[in-house]
Amino acid sequence: MKARSDELQVFVSVIECGSISAAAEQVGQTPSAISRTLSRLEAKLCTTLINRTTRRMDLTEEGRFFFERAKAILAQMDELEERLSLHRQTPSGRLRINAAAPFMLHAIVPWVAEFRERYPDIQLELNTDDLIIDLLEQGTDVAIRIGELSDSSLHARSLGCSPLQILASPEYLARHGTPRQVEDLAGHSLLGFSQTETLNHWPLRHAEGDRLPIRPSLSASSGETLRQLALAGAGIVCLSHFMSHEDVRSGRLQVILAEANSGYRQPIHAVYYRNTQLALRIQCFLDFIQQKLAVYAC
């Protein structure tokens, strides 16, 4: 026979509560019923999970292995039940989204009308910041972060990732020539970020690795400003695909040094505090935008 979910719950409760009597009180059963459930579970698994004496309980090696996986299974079941419950509800209320201006303009704004048509009872509030904000201080439900995450106080959901490309306008290339190899960049005007130094590491293979640190000839704090400078013919820029794909498709910008591109992709995450219960309106937005971002995903 296979172990049942109620048996897993009893086992996990005993370990987390530290005793059979405490677990019995938590799950609303008698200590003798808890003890029988543990014995039945061990018999099904043909192994001893807990060494029990009158004074203490110790997990066996098999018990530790089973405990971690039982917790994970129960968490997945809880999530599944919550999602089924959410599907029966109507999403509504104010939803405050924060993102860097380029992502907001190029990856969220184009889909707002469709989202509002699908979820008319959700009132969107869209705010932009190019620097990382304090979610609680700004009253933000969800922030979209581009790049690697480091804040452990936040819960993150991956929305996909977006390739980085080296780009220039046809006008700039006509005036200054097209770089044929990475070393040719030394003779060109390079557009880069004035803040967050790692954003000036371009995904280009060279003699010392797969990321080329560049020294910008012209710098700006916003990716959208750099995009506009590139469109104006001010130099060569490295931009994420989510904000430049329409420019490339229309020919306003051209991809250069594609063969030297190391293929790095920027992770895209939605973040919110760990103690935040994922409301239905948030879940609907994340599911919706993740589907739309599939065109940029790796």
Image (spheres, helix red, strand yellow):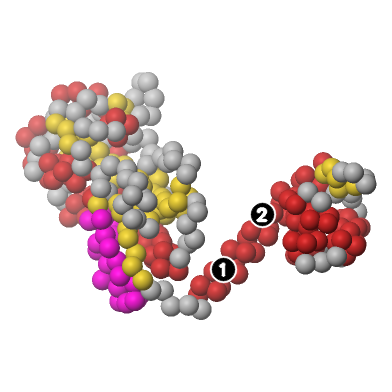
Indicate yes or no whether the magenta region holds residue 104. yes
Which kind of residue does numbered mark 2 sit on?
Ala
Tell me what residue is drawn at x 43 percent, y 78 percent: 90
Query: In the rendering, at what x and y percent does residue 81 appear?
Result: 60, 69
Q: How many marks?
A: 2
| Residue 44 visible in the shown view | no
Identify the element where label 1 is drawn. helix
Disc 2: which residue = 72
Could you say which quadrant of the image residue 250 lies in? Answer: bottom left
Q: Nearer the viewer, residue 255 or 109?
A: 109
Indicate yes or no whether the magenta region holds residue 238. no
Q: Nearer the viewer, residue 266 or 120?
A: 120
Query: In the rendering, at what x and y percent does residue 46 appear?
Result: 91, 54
Real-space Cα distance between discs 2 and 1?
A: 15 Å
Which kind of residue does numbered mark 1 sit on?
Glu
Tell me what residue is drawn at x 33 percent, y 34 percent: 203
Could you say which quadrant of the image residue 110 lies in? Answer: bottom left
Q: Tag 1 or tag 2, which sits nearer the N-term?
A: 2
Tell me what residue is drawn at x 37 percent, y 21 percent: 208
Alpha-carbon neighbours of circle 2 within 10 Å: few (<14), some, or many (≥20)?
few
Disc 1: which residue = 82
Instruction: Please identify the dominant SS of the magenta region.
Output: helix
Query: In the rendering, at what x and y percent does residue 243 appear?
Result: 25, 50
Determine whether, in the image, residue 17 is placed left or right of residue 207. Answer: right
Identify the element where label 2 is drawn. helix
Query: In the rendering, at what x and y percent does residue 241 appear?
Result: 29, 48
- 172 is higher (above) or lower (below) than 271: above
Q: Which residues are magenta?
A: 103-127
Tell me what residue is drawn at x 49 percent, y 60 percent: 277
